[in-house]
Amino acid sequence: MPADPSASLTLTIPVYNGAAFLDGTLSTARAWLATRNTVAELLVVDDCSTDATAEVIRAFAARTENTDAVTFRHVRNERNRGKGFSLRRAFLLANGDHVVFTDADLTYGMHDVATIVGALAGGADVAYGSRMHPDSRYVIAPTFLPKLYTRHAMGRVFNHLARMAVVPGIRDTQAGLKGFRREAARAIASRCRLDRFSFDVEMFFVARRLGLRIDECPVEFLYRKEPSTVRFATDSLRMLRDMARIRCRGVRGVYDRPDPALVRELTGAASDPSIEPAPVATRPAAEQRRLG
């Protein structure tokens, strides 16, 4: 595909109980979108937060004027469904030619979002931030330095297993920054089923199955939190179960075609009635890329 620097962009932010920091995130994201010379939208999916997240979103929407260049939209899940479910909703609702998601606490800054957009403009179907890229950097407070090895080791174990069992060649499945061409995003959303822990791995698996081009991008990772050892042990079991499910579904051909019932579930309960589901499309087989 030729480079397309003028493509429109949807920046989507999934959030759960992010009231403490979300207003700053939304202000930063919208200000960055306003500096671009293309049409853009900021799309927030609230995963049925139990704190004041909904109020923060409504207040931001009330004081934010939509323009021809930048619009703000938001939806709220009727119940807590997980980050994977929230992102698949966003993929089907997004209007941008390119769809990028980032973590709600801006662990990855807007300069990293720009890197992902650049990869998509350069022809990638899927672009992902990778903490394992040779040009990636960690930004960490001195007080967290002793804990960095724990987090790094945990992440490496997960990614090693994912590469061996499901997605060979993908060096960082879990970084919370990824971008997609709109057609690729909708094709993936209409096939994936995992709502929570391993949804990223499933997305990569489906992208590979569709023959999409996947680009790895460097990031500047802002280290802010330390995972719980107990949580990691529990998640490891879930990870193994999910990877087995992905492989089994692949063998059964579950990912070979969109699931209309899944699309209806994802788009049929938007809190904002102005948000309409977009049609699901994928690249014809003759145009699908083959990865080496």
Image (cartoon, grey):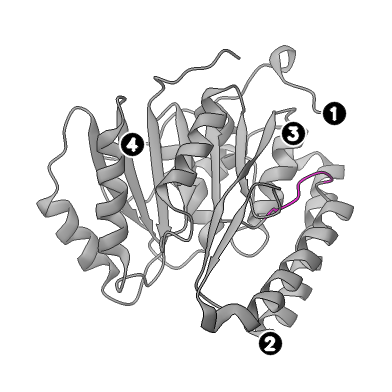
Residue type at numbered disc 3 = Asp
Query: The C terminus appears in which quarter of the rendering?
Result: top right
Q: Position of residue 237 (x, y in %)?
A: 78, 75
Secondary structure state at the residue bearing disc 4: loop
**Residue visible at 69% across and 53% down in the picture:** 173
Query: Is 73 left or right of 258, judged from the image as shown?
Result: left
Relative to 200, residue 140 above or below: below
At label 3, counting other C-alpha atoms closer than 10 Å, the crowd grade (few under 14, some 14-19, many 20 or more) is: few
Q: Is residue 227 visible?
A: no
Relative to 143, residue 159 above or below: above
Measure how far apart labels 4 and 1 are at the Cα level. Answer: 37 Å
- Mark toward the viewer: 2 or 4: 2
- Mark toward the viewer: 3 or 2: 2
Badge number at residue 256: 3
At label 1, counting other C-alpha atoms closer than 10 Å, the crowd grade (few under 14, some 14-19, many 20 or more) is: few
Query: The N terminus appears in which quarter of the rendering?
Result: top right
- Mark toward the viewer: 1 or 3: 1
The residue that label 2 is drawn on is 230
Region in magenta: 168-173
- Mark toward the viewer: 1 or 2: 1
Mark sitting earlier along the chain (1/3): 3
Secondary structure state at the residue bearing disc 3: helix
Residue type at numbered disc 2 = Val
The residue that label 1 is drawn on is 292
Secondary structure state at the residue bearing disc 2: helix
The residue that label 4 is drawn on is 276
Mark sitting earlier along the chain (1/2): 2
Q: Position of residue 152 (x, y in %)?
A: 70, 69
